[in-house]
């Protein structure tokens, strides 16, 4: 009898573990954001600029975009002051950003952008996003508000601006204040990276090609290659070297 009791406990424990695993798997498949157990996919690199607040100097940065099918998340990365900065965009947040860019492009085409209007924070909207940052991958994380602004870098060149204020993480660290400047032509490239039909088509292609899963962490090849790339130059860009539609 004494031997039977531990055996029964072992069988019961194994049953609970197996049941928990099955429930977790079922729950994951029912998650509307779960598009499949596929590796993180690179969506390319855009050569954009960052701009410091109260400055009109454009500092070149490579902004890398990746897509995580398991959470239906697009993440974009750049480096600043040695930190690897990742901003995550779920489906809803991507829709808000696309709408903001469309508003900006329409206002640019209609020449209705003004220096007075540029002073308004969130001129084209805003949304809370997940930001992770650190020297080595996502050492810290918080949820700053990403604003969709615009700024006149020159009197004839109003750039679309992605900006956030510093926000404290649960560990006490403050996230970087990001200001990414995007020209009208570059906005079209961002829209392509955020195109929902293209992302779903990519998932369909992955279904035919993959049967494995890579976690989104420092060991993921796409992420590791991005984070090991150079930060970029702090020498301001000359406006005469920048292609910009007439405003």
Image: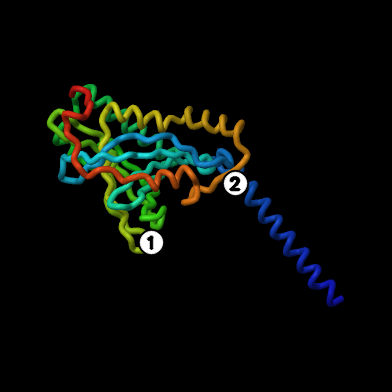
Q: Closer to the N terminus: mark 2 or mark 1?
A: 2
- Residue placed at 81% from the left, 69% from the top? 7
Q: Which mark is residue 178?
A: none
Q: Is residue 222 left or right of residue 245?
A: right
- Residue placed at 73% from the left, 64% from the top? 13
Residue 20 picture location, percent across and down = 67, 56
Q: Is residue 215 left or right of residue 228?
A: right
- Residue placed at 35% from the left, 29% from the top? 189
Residue 187 picture location, percent across and down = 31, 30
- Residue placed at 40% from the left, 44% from the top? 226
Residue 145 picture location, percent across and down = 32, 47
Q: Quadrant of residue 240?
A: top left
Q: Which mark is residue 170?
A: 1
Q: Which residue is mark 2?
A: 28
Give me the C-alpha separation between circle 2 and circle 1: 27 Å
Q: Secondary structure at mark 1?
A: loop
Quarter of the figure that contains the C terminus: top left
Q: Residue furthest right?
A: 1
């Amino acid at each position: 009898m004494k031997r039977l009791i531990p055996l029964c406990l072992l069988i019961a424990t194994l049953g609970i573990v197996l049941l928990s695993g099955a429930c977790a798997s079922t729950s994951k498949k029912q998650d509307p954001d779960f598009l499949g157990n596929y590796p993180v996919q690179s969506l390319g690199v855009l050569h954009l600029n960052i701009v410091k607040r109260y400055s009109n100097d454009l500092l070149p940065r490579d902004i890398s975009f990746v897509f995580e099918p398991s959470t239906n998340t697009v993440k974009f990365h750049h480096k600043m002051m040695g930190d690897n900065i990742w901003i995550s965009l779920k489906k809803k947040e991507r829709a808000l950003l696309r709408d903001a860019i469309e508003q900006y492009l329409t206002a640019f085409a209609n020449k209705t952008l003004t220096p007075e209007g540029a002073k308004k924070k969130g001129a084209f909207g805003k949304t809370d996003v997940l930001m992770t940052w650190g020297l080595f991958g996502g050492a810290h994380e918080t949820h700053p508000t990403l604003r969709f602004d615009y700024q006149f870098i020159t009197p004839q060149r109003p750039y679309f601006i992605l900006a956030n204020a510093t926000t404290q993480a649960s560990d006490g660290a403050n996230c970087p204040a990001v200001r990414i400047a995007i020209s009208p032509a570059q906005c079209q490239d961002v829209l392509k990276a955020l195109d929902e039909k293209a992302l779903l088509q990519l998932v369909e292609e992955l279904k035919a090609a993959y049967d494995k899963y890579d976690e989104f962490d420092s060991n993921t090849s796409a992420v590791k290659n991005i984070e090991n790339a150079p930060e970029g130059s702090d020498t301001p860009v000359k406006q005469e070297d920048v292609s910009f539609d007439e405003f």
